[in-house]
Amino acid sequence: MFVKAILEVAGFTRAIHSISRNFGDTQIQRGSATLFFVNNEGYALTCKHVAQWLSQADPINKKHDEYQAQSKTLNAGQKAGLAKKLGLTVGQTSEMRITFVDCVDTISNLKFFLHPELDLAIIKFDGFQKTLYTNQPSFKKDDNQVQPGAMLCRMGFPFPEFSNYRLNPETQNLEWTKEGTARSPRFPIEGMLTRFLGDANGKIYGMELSTPGLRGQSGGPLFDSEGRIVGMQSRTKHLHLGFDIEDKTIVAHGKTKKVNDYAFIHLGECIHVSVIKEFLRKNNVPFKEE
């Protein structure tokens, strides 16, 4: 049903990869999110919470670099004092490196345009000579054609498998490398449009789907079987079903056990295409409709 649409949408949907670690820890944590390009001018859409996450990298790394530079000649007690002065504590993210996979050849600057209320943002890539994404999306022109019962699909990068990074043993800095796997496979997930989401004034701003948007798919496109954009994955909510099981006796692997189970349904929430187009127009970002 979505085979051709997925191939079409894959051309302009890209992954954001991150590596980070906590203060005093050498364990590297991988993360991912999704964006999709709107035109060939370097404008892309993602969630506001993704854009805010990206904007944290510079101040975090600035503190890290300052600590690294000043702590070289200090003893353990002095290092602890410096960390306290800089606000670095154990368990807190102290270093974070970001890369945009197959987006553009070079980046001199990123500009963020955040929606004042909704989980929606525009990213503008500056300084590139060549785009590495192919084709451009077509946004659904008639918003009213998308109604509850429609089967739709989301795409993103929820399962990071990249391995092109390391903690440099000499500099004690995280860095991207030319070795290892630089990409993660895209992952589509379908769902039925169940309900619309409205604000206090009754204006529709989003759509609820019968399946969850997966962690890492935030900012990915929601599209129909023709590949037309009808929304963007934002978040997943968890509704308690009330089918609770407490102290239920079962036999598992030949042993009698008592179990508890509290069932939830996980529903994806997406930003509606009408809101996206309104936000693009407000920021003078050209896009195609179909």
Image: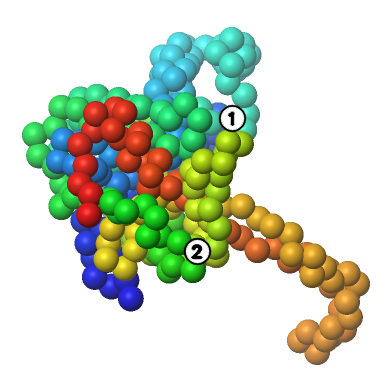
Q: Position of residue 64 (x, y in %)?
A: 45, 21
Which residue is located at x 61 percent, y 60 percent? 266
Q: Which residue in the structure is indicated by mark 2?
A: 148
Task: In this rendered view, identify the residue nearer to me: 254 or 39.
Answer: 39
Is residue 124 left or right of 259 when viewed as pictured? left
Task: In this rendered view, identify the residue nearer to me: 105 or 279.
Answer: 279
Q: Position of residue 161 (x, y in %)?
A: 38, 57
Query: Disc 1 vs disc 2: which is toward the camera?
Result: 2
Is residue 223 left or right of 81 when viewed as pictured? left
Q: Are marks 1 and 2 in contact (CB under 8 Å)?
A: no
Task: In this rendered view, identify the residue nearer to me: 3 or 250.
Answer: 3
- Vertical placement of residue 139 versus 26, above or below: below
- Gap in Å between the C-alphas at discs 1 and 2? 43 Å
Q: Secondary structure at mark 2?
A: loop
Q: Which residue in the structure is indicated by mark 1?
A: 92
Which residue is located at x 65 percent, y 55 percent? 238
Q: Amino acid at mark 1?
A: Gln
The dot on residue 239 is none
Q: Amino acid at mark 2?
A: Pro
Quarter of the image for residue 144 reads bottom left
